[in-house]
Image (cartoon, rainbow, N blue to C red):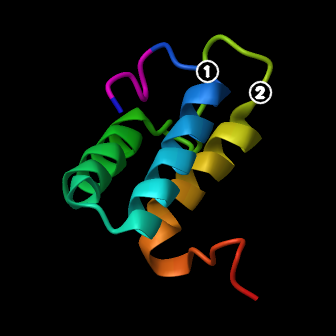
Amino acid sequence: DQDVGGHVGGEEFLGALFATQALFLERTEQYGSWYPRIVSGLVKSQNADGSWQGHHCITDRVFCTACSIMTMLVPDKLVPMNER
């Protein structure tokens, strides 16, 4: 969460998504402090057109934007892969 919006690439946006999902599923107390920080970082790094962009990798705005939106929706929309 320290460099979201800085000079990150798509991998960092994907990492933010995976970390948020893992902390949410485990119901750790770290999730309580993590989620507001990562959402704040994402909101601050959002482009004027509503997208997010990686700065040093082959992923594009669509990938980074999808990861950002999915990260922010974790508490409302996450369906774990092991649930049927």
Residue 4 colored in magenta in the image: yes
Disc assigned to residue 59: 2
Q: Are marks 2 and 1 in contact (CB under 8 Å)?
A: yes
Task: Let me know if residue 65 appears in the view.
Answer: yes
Where disc 2 sits, the SS reads loop
Disc assigned to residue 78: none
Q: Is residue 2 above or below residue 26?
A: above
Q: Position of residue 65 (x, y in %)?
A: 63, 45
Q: Is residue 82 above or below residue 64?
A: below
Name the residue located 47 percent from the left edge and 46 percent from the top edge: 19
Hey, what amino acid is under mark 2? Thr
Where, by quadrant of the figure, is residue 23 drawn?
Answer: bottom left
Q: CA distance from mark 2 to mark 1?
A: 7 Å
Hey, what amino acid is under mark 1? Gly
Q: Is residue 57 above or below residue 20?
A: above
Where, by quadrant of the figure, is residue 4 drawn?
Answer: top left
The quadrant of the image that shows the C terminus is: bottom right
Q: Position of residue 64 (x, y in %)?
A: 64, 38
Magenta region: 2-6
Neighbor class of circle 1 (other Cα within 10 Å; few <14, some 14-19, many 20+) is many
